[in-house]
Image (cartoon, rainbow, N blue to C red):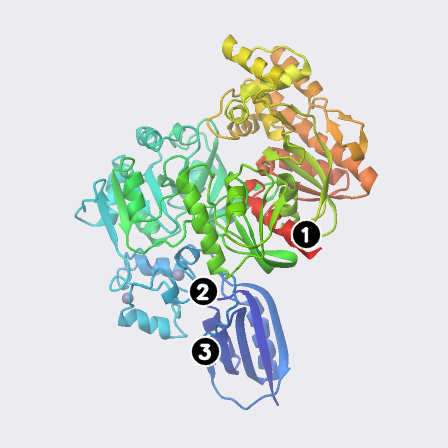
Amino acid sequence: MSSARHVIVEGVVQGVGFRPFVYGTANRHRLSGWVRNTAIGVEIEVEGEAVGIHGFLDDLERRAPPLARIEKIESTDITPRGRSGFRIDPSADEGGFLPVSADVATCDACLGDVHDPANRRFRYPFTNCTNCGPRFTIVRSIPYDRPNTTMAGFRMCAACQREYDDPADRRFHAEPNACPECGPALELVDAARRPIDGDPLALTSRLLAAGEIVAIKGIGGFHLACDARKAAAVRRLRRRKEREGKPFALMAATLDEVQRISLVTGEEQRLLESPARPIVILRERADSGIAPSVAHPLRELGIMLPYSPLHHLLFAEGECPRALVLTSGNRAGEPIARDEAEALERLSDIADALLLHDRPIEVRCDDSVTRVAAGDELPIRRSRGYAPYPVRLPFEAPPLLACGADLKTTICVARGRHAFLSPHVGDLEDADTWRSYSQMVAHMEAVFRIRPEAIVHDLHPDYLSTRFATEAATGAPRVAVQHHHAHVASCMAEHGLDGEVIGVAFDGTGYGTDGTVWGGEFLVAGYASFRRAGHLGTVAMPGGARAIREPFRMAFAHARHAGIGIDLPVSAEEIEAIEWQIARGVNAPLTSSIGRLFDAVASLAGVRHRALYEGQAAMELEARVAPGEFGAYPFPIDGRGLAAGWIADPRPLVTAVVEDRRRGVAPAIIAARFHESVARLVAEMCGRIREETELSRVVLGGGVFQNATLLGRTLELLRREAFDSFRHRIVPPNDAGIALGQAAIAAARLRG
Ligand code: ZN
Ligand code: ZN
Ligand code: FE
């Protein structure tokens, strides 16, 4: 007795080999029918023995191709029609939209091809298939078909076309399919764009081995590469790139090599080897041999494994160093270079040579950065390999654009139950980043076919993202969202929470509703609204933004606030100027920032007085924490109650830190006690808020929760107090995750 089903599969199911998988599965179960791509996913009709249909539906879920992300399978009984054979029908574009796959690291089968001398793709750096290769970075518009990608200009040769047309082939409808006959090619040039004769890969590896700097065009932009074990090369790269302090990322040839450099746990290995191939933050071994200037003085290194055939082939060259610095191809502050013209303009006085290729990059995508903290992934930068996989919203959203914040900016477009976060755009401070921000907005709107019905932005009037939102030529209403509310909503949306929660938002700075600089906030929040239930007591931030680069300013402000004198290794004139700023309230905004308190304590403990980048002092303070020390400083909460806002008083803590320092207590012990104090403050403050509100779900957001020590200990104490706590696992806790929170809040307000 024959039966039939109509099936709709939703999720990331196009460009990932899903139709040939359906074709093969249907044939294996002796079913007839058809499959095709539609605007919302994949549509299937199957007909045959009932047992075959059952097996088919089972396999659809359990054996889906590795890159498919199935969100929903809906199937309904239909009348059998006595069809024979199974076919793949052409796509139906009905003007809808659907998730586009992120870029995916080279699969094992393709690696086999490029290392096999008998294969026609032997040593071909642009090899890919339906299970791997570039995706989001080559998409110009949807549907995801070759003419809508940057591969449009390459006409497939007969052999590639045969693979592309054959449902039984691994390259069936692999849109970037290419080979040495018909696809992109490498070219090595010097800084004046003169071609260097010879094999580009062999020459590049020789240059790197000789300590030279090579700019390498990759998947989402250019990298600058040099031998990570040659101190002189790394120093030269730092000098030329005008990047003083920030750690460089490494690419290691193999997992063995990563383990030679650093300690790797099982979960970290899983992230290193995942198809997204992010940079994973790892603890460095003392005998790693890596040049100290790569990440000095942090004993942490960001390391990734090769993710394109080009990387694998480069490391396969005998001479190539086993560990390369591979940092984004830009000068400090600028966006990563995307095309040849940009690369030559910006990188020719940094790199000794440039390894180019002619496959255009449609959208910039920096390497993603992630780590393991408190037993789970904690993303720091969500870009290549992750973007633009959507976050599923707990409710429907109208089409909208959320503009993000100012630092580490990403944007978010939302529609229905999907929120798509863009790759990392960067800090909106120079004209180039500003231009790439506008391009990213246009690209995201085009790829996801979104015409925003609302534009969402931060409450800060001076953020460039706010200016973008308010100047955008559109009739769509604007929604302004408070920064820390957005941090909390971002984490709520990630976990699909609804209703009210206790939101803890700890970061460097964000614009408050009272015009002061917030950053140590305890909110009672839902999506539509929030109350400020508590915060860190405010102190002056002398010099405004300068205080971010000069933690000693915060040390001075906090000590002065606590009424104690301290010695700082800065000139008397400088102190006098700071004193004057605070006393007169000139360029000394009040702040409740926990990030700035970390800076102050880093300086008071003698760890760092001046920072080369935001958060450096806090990171070094965390790196110092002495394991096993659980002493804490007093951090009292004053009893004004929820209505007026609880105030966490930093003065006794600051006084105790200074006393410890005077007694000669080691910075490592001070660092540990300080972290413990902040974790205890969170548990205690949440306890008070629970007493008044009966809320017991706690959501942790904001860049300060990148601090694994603080995050881990806070979660532990909250668990002990029987709170349900939620931390970021998909979206970064820092400002890169803000746009998601903005989108969720705006959707809720428009709904209400
Ligand atoms: Zn492949
Ligand atoms: Zn070909
Ligand atoms: Fe923030």
**Do callouts 3 and 2 mark residues in contact (Cβ within 8 Å)?**
no
Q: Viewer-nearest of labels 3 and 2? A: 2
Q: Up-down: is 615 above or below 318?
A: above
Given residues 108 and 76, the one toward you in this image is: 76
Say what secondary structure mark 2 lies in: loop
Q: In the image, which disc is placed on residue 142?
A: 2
Q: Viewer-nearest of labels 2 and 1? A: 1
Callout 1 environment at 10 Å: few (<14), some (14 to 19), or many (20+)? Answer: few
Tell me the quadrant of the picture where the C terminus can be found. bottom right
Point out the tag, 3 or 2, that comes first from the N-terminus.
3
Say what secondary structure mark 1 lies in: helix
Q: CA distance from mark 2 to mark 1?
A: 30 Å
Say which amino acid is labelled 3. Ile
Q: CA distance from mark 3 to mark 2?
A: 19 Å
Q: In the image, which disc is placed on residue 749?
A: 1
Q: Is residue 531 left or right of residue 444?
A: right
Q: Is residue 600 left or right of residue 447?
A: right
Given residues 460 and 295, the one toward you in this image is: 460
Q: In the image, which disc is placed on residue 88?
A: 3
Whether the residue carrying mark 3 lies under 8 Å from ligand 1 is answered with no
Say what secondary structure mark 3 lies in: strand
Point out the tag, 1 or 3, that comes first from the N-terminus.
3
Whether the residue carrying mark 1 lies under 8 Å from ligand 3 is answered with no
**Do callouts 1 and 3 mark residues in contact (Cβ within 8 Å)?**
no
